Image: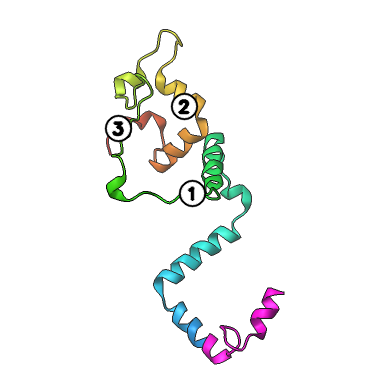
Amino acid sequence: DRLTFLLSMENGFIWNDNYASTQLDLVSKNELFTTALHKMHGLISAHPDDVEPKSKEAKRRLTFFVNSLFMDIPNSPNMQDMMSWNVMTPFYSEDVTYNKSDLTKTEKTLGVSVLLYLQTLYKADWQHFVERMKITDEGQIWSKK
């Protein structure tokens, strides 16, 4: 119904062929539009299995983010009325960054190193990291490029 309504309008993009053709020519020469169109085509034509995250944590975070887009968000106060923002990353006394010795040291309670524990727990994420860093042999992880 809406498409029929758009086609029957006397003034609009589709009604006048000459106008539509001119506008499409202008848009096709716009670099930003062409880039966005190529990316959109890639997303639309991709198979769902190739696009869906493999990690359960990534799926959970993405679902939470998408659901948050549909929330009713109240208007934000003026900048002058806002309190200052603080960010605290560590959870209690949790280490956030590790050096090489911390990662390779064998924990007495688990009997394995932190690195091996994380590699085992987040196997897919580790494989993606190794792929992004273009590491062919995992023995070369600590070598400098």
Q: Amino acid at mark 1?
A: Ile
- For label 1, the residue is 73
Question: What SS does tag 1 mark?
Answer: loop
- The x and y percentages for residue 31 are 40, 72
- For label 2, the residue is 119
Q: Which mark is residue 47?
A: none
- 3D distance between C-alphas at marks 3 and 1: 48 Å
- The x and y percentages for residue 107 are 40, 12
Q: Tell which residue pokes out farthest to the right in this image.
A: 1
Q: In the rendered structure, which segment of residues is drawn in magenta? A: 1-20
Residue under the image location 41 percent in, 33 percent down:
137
In this view of the protein, which residue sits in the foreground, 59 or 92?
92
- 3D distance between C-alphas at marks 1 and 2: 39 Å
Residue under the image location 30 percent in, 46 percent down:
81
Question: What SS does tag 2 mark?
Answer: helix
Nearer-N-terminus badge (3/2): 2
Q: Residues within 10 Å of mark 3 (few under 14, many from 20)?
A: few
**Is residue 37 placed above or below 66 in the rendered structure?**
below
Q: Amino acid at mark 3?
A: Ser
- For label 3, the residue is 143
- The x and y percentages for residue 72 are 53, 49
Nearer-N-terminus badge (1/2): 1
Mark 1 vs mark 2, foreground winner is 1
Q: Quadrant of the C terminus?
A: top left
Q: Amino acid at mark 2?
A: Gln
Say which quarter of the image contains residue 135.
top left
In this view of the protein, which residue sits in the foreground, 55 or 27?
27
Q: Residues within 10 Å of mark 2 (few under 14, many from 20)?
A: some
